[in-house]
Image: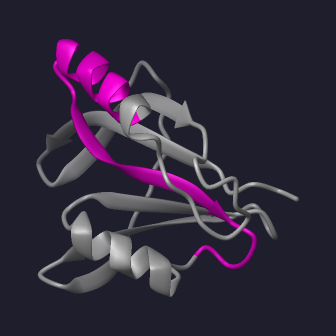
Amino acid sequence: MQVEVCVLYFGKRVNGKFLVKLVRITRNKLCSSARFEVDAQEFYNALKRAEEEGLEFLGFFHSHHAKPEPSQIDLQGMRLWEGYVWLIFSTLDYSMKAYLMSESKVEEVEVRIKNGSED
């Protein structure tokens, strides 16, 4: 069984963009192929490290064994974490999409991967 991947990412919000500077891979507490839950202590430790580096929590990255679109469970989580970006990676076709919920509406947002030396 493939377990759904879950990752936390941290960085800065600049001019409406989310600039990721730190990525923290966490274990999926549920050991599920369809759902993920980050361990609270792992989340706290990652958040503490990020804050020490002057970074803020930006969102979640997780995998789907389907298209990279929010599931009903994701939408529930997005309501709790409104304003944070959810990156979803498809293990079917290796594509990725990002979503942001704002004012109870979900919109797809652009993802650009840049060289680490660029701002």
Horizontal side of 107 relative to 53 (left or right) equals: right
Residue 113 visible (yes or no): yes
Residue at (60% x, 39% y) in the render? 27
Residue at (45% x, 74% y) in the render? 74
* Tally of numbered discs: 0
| Rendering coords of residue 87 (x, y %) | 48, 59
Against 26, is 55 above or below? above
Give, as a single range, the part of the protein colored magenta. 43-68
- The quadrant in which the C terminus is found is top left
| Rendering coords of residue 58 (x, y %) | 28, 46
Magenta highlight on residue 50: yes
The quarter of the displayed image where residue 68 is located:
bottom right
Outermost top residue: 52
Residue at (26% x, 40% y) in the render? 57
Residue at (30% x, 30% y) in the render? 44
Nearer the observer, 17 or 51 = 51
Residue 108 visible (yes or no): no
Magenta highlight on residue 101: no
| Rendering coords of residue 94 (x, y %) | 75, 61
The quarter of the displayed image where residue 107 is located:
bottom left
